Amino acid sequence: MASLLTLFMCFTFTAIPFFSPVSAEPAAKTYIFRVDSFSKPAVFPTHYHWYTSEFTEPVNILHVYDTVFHGFSASLTPSQAASVLQHPSILATFEDRLRQLHTTRSPQFLGLRNQKGLWSESDYGSDVIVGVLDTGIWPERRSFSDLNLGPVPPRWKGVCETGDKFTAHNCNRKIIGARFFSKGHEAAPGFGPIGGGINNTVEFKSPRDADGHGTHTASTAAGRHAFRASMSGYASGIAKGVAPKARLAVYKVCWKNSGCFDSDILAAFDAAVSDGVDVISISIGGGDGISSPYYLDPIAIGAYGAVSRGVFVSSSAGNDGPNGMSVTNLAPWLTTVGAGTIDRNFPAEVILGDGRKLFGVSLYAGKPLNGKMFSVVYPGKSGVLSASLCMENSLDPHLVRGKIVICDRGSNPRVAKGMVVNKAGGVGMILANGVSNGEGLVGDAHLIPTCAVGANEGDAIKSYIVKNPTASATINFHGTVIGVKPAPVVASFSGRGPNGLNPEILKPDLIAPGVNILAAWTDAVGPTGTSMACPHVSGAAALLKSAHPDWSPAAIRSAMMTTANLVDNRLQPMTDEATGKPVTPYDYGAGHLNLDLALDPGLVYDLANEDYVSFLCAIEYGPKTIQVITKSPVNCSMRKPLPENLNYPSIAALFSTSSRGVSSKAFFRTVTNVGDANAVYRVKIEAPKGVTVSVKPAKLVFTEKVRKLSYYVTITVDSKNLVLNDSGAVFGSLSWIDGKHVVRSPIVVTQMSPL
């Protein structure tokens, strides 16, 4: 089974030209065209009629977009695409790209309690509709029962698409809609195993989930209470999603072992918003440290179309940490979620022949080794990379039979490595992290006795083998441990700031549980833990939307950010799993999701469509470029706004490295009172080291009639006194306090070379 903690990566691809004596037209590719919808001649009854009359043949068109985006995708040769691009109504075009996919205890860890607080106030998210863009769903799981749920909300306009192993009966009052999107996927020209369509030996051409990732994210966000839940005896209890009564709409855009195409993702956004979802959860992204500008990123474009209609969009920060500037999904209208640990672990230990104990994790539930010692070998000692990674057919049975085998983490799925060891006759596996994973561990339901260990422990075991020709070891398993400290810890793989496109906007926005999260899985594959931070925030948004139907997506995000936790369960500053050192807002944004407080945040930083348009003007996008994102033509004012004045719940101050002496920057923010009408808030400033922060006014007085108030923040630095930390910044905060609420915004101060 493909690991569910897959790296989020974004590949662009080009057709490989076929060289022959006769010049041949390159193969067709999929292009996405943004069309100025206002240019449609009245003679055409629909946009589709216009597109097929003036732009291309009907047979070439894959998707027509008309809700979050105006335009179409089509399979064309480069010369055909160039011809279409010359039409005056075409605003932009981009080639289709391949993307990759980026519980029982986590709701309690977030502060949710039965019969009180947010669960009670929101009726567990009842009647809120969560759209999940992922690998589909396995509808028979108990998490998707519709027992005692009321009728489907009358505003719902979606459908239950049928197909391979999926009938209309697989939808119910819980899974109220299901669709699948494969046209972009099937049109891809020979891209690895997927050229020529869906692989029916491993996939279902329907909303049914052959991978497990979609079932896992859906049940994490909105799974029902499943009593007596456990995973092979681990983590027993009552499994439930964050919003147990919310309705699910499933949009299958990703396919087993072969990713997801932008053209299909955009079509799913279009359908989800048209269908009537309230929340969209998308654990997909482009990574490798390079983010496309918003007008070339269909996830950003689709999300803008959704947010502009009041739909909250939760997206993942990516799995390319702990490197700096690795965070993905950067658009300021997206809520970008990093990953933290929870206070539950599944400890295991490797005992070496010299008596040393090295600790790790495992969800192995089979027959234990009972303390019996076995020879231990490291196939990677040979220098052959495939053997060190325990890739398929890479192990010599004469070397590993009857022994415990060390396999390095990476490339192939973690559980699959154990199957390779087993096939070659090995009796157990030690799964060793490399430097990039550090000490970050993920518990998996391995099929043979296995312990995952950090990079330091892995190096110690390998060193022991080199020095001892008769090296031996055994593995012990200790089940489930609750109350682990410290927790949360920022996961080593979680995408980190700063924001590589617009550092004036702090990303990620916050973190949520994303390590060893147990949830529903499919019958097609076995269960495993995985990174699931994004659907936790999707479920949280459903609860807040249910409790506060009039809140905008920006207000919901603000409520989560300004009430987030900064400390772990030792009441100490949160630390980094990769280094053990304290973390910064580049790692956790505003902090760790705390739903106990988000229900009643006191004040929110709200944003409307015109605020985002003003931001796009501020980053010097032209009117036609902005229309690619917003659909409507815009006029940027002559007086250019500043991107840092977007009314965001965090503040990032960028100063030029070339400036000497004292420099100041002013920031403008507006807060909306969503608490007691006659509240009085006073400011509390924690200035970053070597920085002066002042706020005017220092007191905000709200009344029945005055619900919105604004303030200025002035940040002053002296280049002689400013000493940036290892991450290239210094950090502080600004909080508004009324005696009941603490409305906190992180402050980031950094220096950058001017372009």
Image: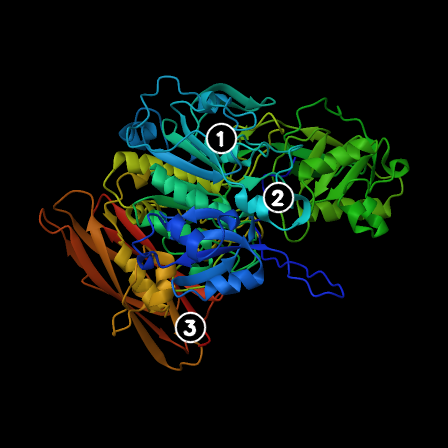
**What residue is drawn where x is 62% and y is 43%?**
258
Answer few, some or many: residues within 10 Å of disc 2's Cα (few below 14, many 20 plus, some between 14 and 19): some
**Alpha carbons under labels 2 and 3: distance apart:** 48 Å
**What residue is drawn where x is 37% and y is 58%?**
629
Quick one: label 2 or label 1, which is nearer the N terminus? 1
Mark 2: which amino acid? Ser
- Taking depth in this image into account, of 440 and 388 the one nearest to the observer is 388
Q: Secondary structure at mark 3?
A: loop
Q: Which mark is residue 722?
A: 3
Answer few, some or many: residues within 10 Å of disc 1's Cα (few below 14, many 20 plus, some between 14 and 19): many
**Alpha carbons under labels 1 and 3: distance apart:** 44 Å
Closest to the camera, between mark 2 and mark 1, is 2
Q: Which mark is residue 258?
A: 2
Q: Secondary structure at mark 1?
A: loop
**Measured from the top left, where is residue 176 in percent x and y?**
39, 28
Report which residue position mark 1 lands on: 103
Q: Are marks 2 and 3 in contact (CB under 8 Å)?
A: no
Q: Are marks 1 and 3 in contact (CB under 8 Å)?
A: no
- Taking depth in this image into account, of 246 and 475 the one nearest to the observer is 246
Quick one: label 2 or label 3, which is nearer the N terminus? 2
